[in-house]
Amino acid sequence: MNENSIKIPKQLRGRDLHTNIIPTVCNLKNMLNKLKIVNGDYKKLKQWEKRSYQAYLIDEINEQILNSAIEENIEIIRNHILKNNPYKLGASCIDIYLVAYVAETYGTGKDTFFKYIFESGISDKKNSAQAIWQVGKGDGIFLRILNEDGSVRDWNFFINWIKGEATSIQQLQDNIDKEESCPFCTITDPILQNELAIGFFDKYPVNKGHLLIIPRRHVDQYFDLKIEERQAIDDLLFQGKSLVDEEYSPAGYNIGINNGEVAGQTIFHVHVHLIPRYKGDMEEPRGGVRGVIPEKRMY
C-alpha cells in the first residue's frame, strides 16, 4: 500500500462482495471486440458475452463504444463504472473490486485469493474461484485499474469508486472506519433485501418475528436518508409484514425508529423496528409507542 492508498472496505458503498459475484468466464476486451464486429447488436453476442455486456451496463454506452477506438473505450468504461451505483453493476465488474480487496487486505496471488473465496463461504468450488480471479483480474488489468498480481494500480480510480459522496479522503476514511465498527454494516445474510436496503430478525427481539429494516449505506439517522432509501425501506417493511403474517399471524404491529441518543438509539446506523404484537403480550397495550415515556403512555 502506498502513500496515496487507503484501506479498502469490505463492502463497496454497501454492496456486499460475497453475493452475486460469480461470473461467466468472458473478458471485457474480447466482448468489446465482438461488439464492434456485430455493429453493437446485442442479440448477436454469445451467451457468455452477453453476461459481460450486462455486468458493465454497456447498453447505456453502446453508441459511445462503437464510435470510439479501444483506448477511448477504456476511459469511457472507467468513467461509466464510477458514475453507476455499485448495486447495478454485475459480477464481472464487482470482481475487479473483490480481487483488489483480497490483494490489498490479505496479500497478492492466486493462492491467497482462492483461500479467501473458500474460507469466506463465497464458494467451495475451484472453478468458481478461478472464474472470479480470471475475470476480475483480467478486466482490471485491461481497464488499467489493477496490476498483474491483483493489487491496485490506479489508486485515484479506486478512491473515487469507494468515495461516492464523500467530499475528502479524510471523510472517506472516517466513513470506512464507521462501517467497519458498525454491527449492521457487516450483515451478509439478510432475509429481505433490495437494491438499497436489507431486513433481518432482531438479535434481541421484543416479540417473536421482530424485524429490523436498514439502509445498506451507513447513515446515522433517519432524516439523513435519501428519498429512494426511504422508499426501499418502506418496500421491505411491507415485505416483512407479509413474511411475519404468514409465519406468526400477529394481531398487530408497532413500527418505530429511535433517532438520536436521547430517543434511545444505541447503534448509529438507521434501523426501523417492525415489532409484531400478540393478544395478551402485555396487560394494557393502550398508548402503544407513547410508552417511550412511560408516564405519558396512558391518556
Image (tube, rainbow, N blue to C red):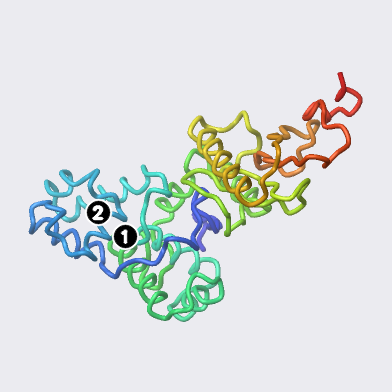
Q: Quadrant of residue 230?
A: top right
Name which residue lies at 55% across and 67% down: 105
Closer to the camera, 19 or 33? Answer: 19
Q: Position of residue 140 (x, y in %)?
A: 34, 63
Q: Mark 1: few, some, or many residues within 10 Å (few <14, many ≥20)?
A: some
Badge 1 amino acid = Arg
Figure check: 291 above or below 60: above
- The residue at the far right in this view is 295
Badge 2 amino acid = Ile
| Lower position in the chain sequence, tag 2 or tag 1 | 2
- The residue at the far top in this view is 299
Q: Position of residue 118 (x, y in %)?
A: 51, 76
Q: Is residue 78 left or right of residue 113?
A: left
Closer to the camera, 186 or 167? Answer: 186
Q: Position of residue 48 (x, y in %)?
A: 24, 66
Instruction: Name the residue beneath numbered marker 1.
Output: 144
Name which residue lies at 11% across and 46% down: 67
* Number of marks in the rendered image: 2
